[in-house]
Amino acid sequence: MNSTHQEAATPSQKPALLEVRELVKYYPGRGVWPKPQPIKAVDNISFAIGYGETLGLVGESGCGKSTAAKTILRLIEPTSGAIVLEGTDIAKLSTSQFRPYRRDLQIVFQDPYSSLNPRMRARDIVAEPLQNFGRSGDCDDDKMAALFARVGLDREAMRKFPSEFSGGQRQRLGIARALALNPKLIVCDEPVSALDVSIQAQVINLLEDLQHELGVSYLFVAHDLAVVRHISQRVAVMYLGRIVEIGPVGELYANPRHPYTQALLAAVPKVGAGLAREKTLLKGDLPSPAKPPSGCTFRTRCPMARSECAESSPQLAAQGPQHWAACHFI
Amino acid sequence: MDLSLERLEQRIARQANQPRALRFARRHPLLVLGLVLLAIVVFLAIFAPWLCANDPTEMNVIARLKPSSAEHVFGTDAMGRDIFSRTLHGARVSLLVGFCVALLSAAVGIVVGTVAGFSRWIDAIVMRFMDGMMAIPGILLAVALMTLTQASVQTVIIAIALPEIPRVVRLVRALVLTIREQPYIQAAHACGTRLPRILARHVVPNLLTPLIVQASFICASAMIFEAYLSFLGAGTPPEVPSWGNIMADGRSVVQLAFGVILYPGLFLGLTVLAVNLIGDGLRDLLDPRIAKKL
Amino acid sequence: MSTPLLEVTDLHLAFASREGVTRALEGVSWQLNAGEMLGIVGESGCGKSVTAMAVLRLLPAPPTTHISGAIRFRGENLLQASEARLQEIRGNEISMIFQDPMTSVNPVLTIGEQIAEVLMLHQKLARRAAWARAVELLDLVNIPDPQRRVHEYPHQFSGGMRQRAMIAIALACKPDVLIADEPTTALDVTIQAQIMELLDRLRRETGTAIVLITHDLGVVAESCDRVVVMYAGAKVEEAATNELFARPSHPYTRGLLDAMPRLDTPLTEPRGRLPEIPGMVPSLRGAAVGCRFAPRCALAIDRCRSEVPPFAPIDGANPTHRAACWRTVCEAIAE
């Protein structure tokens, strides 16, 4: 089991920027009687992100993708597992030991409205990370203006309050804040899902341009499969706290192995498919993470489920070069 | 339809061109009324020594219980003291008590409430203590404090502020609990901001708006409370002319000289009304949901 | 051609506030025929949701709102209907479902009570009959175990089930028209697929005509018969679905389609940039002096900035495919 995890973790021969091994986040269950089971928000996941690479993390709401992403930044404390950033396991560090590593790990949030303090000016918002790490010297007007220009905001924008910006501009502001410290990895937690299509394209292009210029890596968490396909080199699919499939983007989208990945791709509405469509619709809803099904957690909605799926939980198994999926029947 | 719309647009544009003060007054008439009333009272209180010909404490046995006259505008009380002068000087005490209580309870509330909102174990201790304080009737607490200590304006302020504090702490704590879940707090953590700085830059500034509104209501109720305590003889020392004291003095002579109770009572009512109007006005002004209406 | 079931004609809608007058709709017209699914697509602020609210007269009263034009339901102008008549129509002949299924149901009433209430109000059913019908309706919208579920509260339902329950409430009185305002935006793709399939099936089974309001072109492409594309309070293009996606003519429609990452384009390395629509949605203060899209349009000429383009067929061959553009895309390519 461990060997497959280790393999799945490595993106390629090169050493990875970030390696997540057997990451677990349990929340205590509610109630007193019957004895509550922990809620397994993230249940033993492993993956790695290379330098300058984008790993897409997709899944439906409640699958634990956001929790996993925030655990990496220790905005949520992991229950167990290792988060290795360039050789250092940051999950084991104390809060003060971890603090310097925040410079390398930044985040862009989903909601461009509530992730900016409404009482701070744009300039102060973007300058905050620099001041936190004693780099107030880098906060002079010209350097700030250059940072603003890099995300497509003009000098005038520095004096404004968040409420004076549109949704897309606010997201640019969030990106500028994440870029201020020249991080090595930016976790993008659904950065475009609150934006309109035309604005979404602008922000995606900005993120890609920044990656080309600065070589920053992204962990791109999203539920929109088409966006993830466009921006990622590799993609991991999560279901109820586990990674059910992970692989290079072309391979995973062209040849999805796990029935969940297949169903997810089939469910995406497509322009040009026409009215006559025959979809294999998934039955039912996502089970509650507090009471996950036994064995393979997907079996309650899986068209291929058989009796043995209830008994044992499938492990990730190699499907091709760097392509793993966790299912008994593939 | 377009015609009427264009007319409406012109009207809105005309209003936008009016002086800012006028526009503000049209939109928030009650707030402006409250501010004007309060400004008048504050002015009278500050310049009381220069506005009054008579000393508020000077007794004049000959001129007892006199009705209004050119010399004594509001008449005199049982000891022949000038009520006009006493009422204006009384405004100083009331305003001082009102502002200080509001400031004190807000300051303590911010500190205690914010800390309680961010630390679970402090929260457990502090909130039980506050629950205990809330179980004691405010008036009893204040009277007990006043009897235990030397009567002075400072002790009155503390005695009135003390029962207010638990309520402010509860409000602040509730606000902090919602603010700490905001993504911008998480964003601050993520970019390495330390906790004290998060509290100072991100939490407290976002608390202030609702707190200012609450503080203005506390200010109004503190002024009433002060009059209340003084009237009962448990407040400001009797030699200090506060509205409560003046009215207490007038209690026995109300049938002979109504003005002894009428004028300070009127001033108290108007001042409290003014402060409450300001509180209501600020709430509407600062609430984005109510804003923007035509 | 028979008279349409629901007909919106030259609808103008403006909201007045202290800052000025926002022209949310400027002369929008469309028709909905019996049994049809009409898609209205556009980005936030284009006026698509406001149109739906106007149909059911759910907007604030004047002087905040100024409305003109006509909304005819079976020939009856709803803009002139009395409040009593509107009460009869709402939820009975025309019903609506909203984006957020949690905020549009009452959390302290069971799902069954909410469905039964509608039935007792509009169809004058007895309590027992209404409850029996509620169970039937939950079954119709594929809620498992409807006998038990009918007694549950909205918070006991998952997001997808709540949206189904909303649809059940909306369909309780067998309405002629169902207006679905972003019905799947808050839902996951797999659940979205279920809901869209449900709407499609119900339309075929009950003959209810549906107005689907959404920002998602993919959803429209897969389910609607006709599409209206809106931008900044105006209709910019209208066509049968296949026609629209085969030959998008307005530069805005084209831009939207291009800006969407797709699952079927080949992956290149490095990835090509997504064609973006520069700038952002304009303010709707003041009357339009030209095409609202002109400032963001790569094809704009002087005329686009000075004259509002008429809504006209893009060529003689297909009179039902119309767009509001001085330079249809075809013409621009020919040059």
Image (cartoon, rainbow, N blue to C red):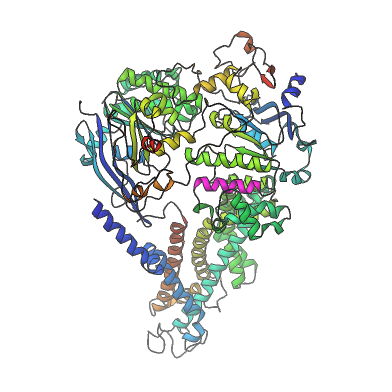
- Magenta region, residue range: A166-180
Q: Quadrant of residue A302?
A: top right
Residue furthest to the bottom: B62
Q: Is residue C179 magenta?
A: no
**Residue at position x 21%, y 30% from top?**
C74
Is B213 on the left-hand or right-hand side of C270? Answer: left
Can residue A114 be seen in the rendering of this structure?
A: no
Quadrant into which the C terminus of chain C falls: top left
- Name the residue: 50% across, 22% down: A267
Give left or right: position of C250 versus A224.
Answer: left
The front one of C282 and C211 is C282
Up/down of C145 relative to C115, above or below:
above
> Foreground residue, B153 or C48?
C48
Q: Is residue A252 above or below residue C273?
A: above
Secondary structure mostly seen in magenta is: helix
- Please state the horizontal and vertical placement of residue C4, each as a whole percent of the image: 23, 29
Instruction: Spot the residue most to the front.
Output: C335
Query: In the rendered image, which quarter contains the N terminus of chain C?
Result: top left
Q: Is residue A89 above or below residue A124?
A: above
Specify the quadrant of the image occupied by residue C98. top left
Where residue B109 appears, as percent x and y from the top left, is: 60, 57
Q: Residue furthest top?
A: A307
Depth check: B74 or A91 in front?
A: A91
Where residue A215 appears, as percent x and y from the top left, is 69, 40
Residue shown at 51%/72% (left/top)?
A: B94
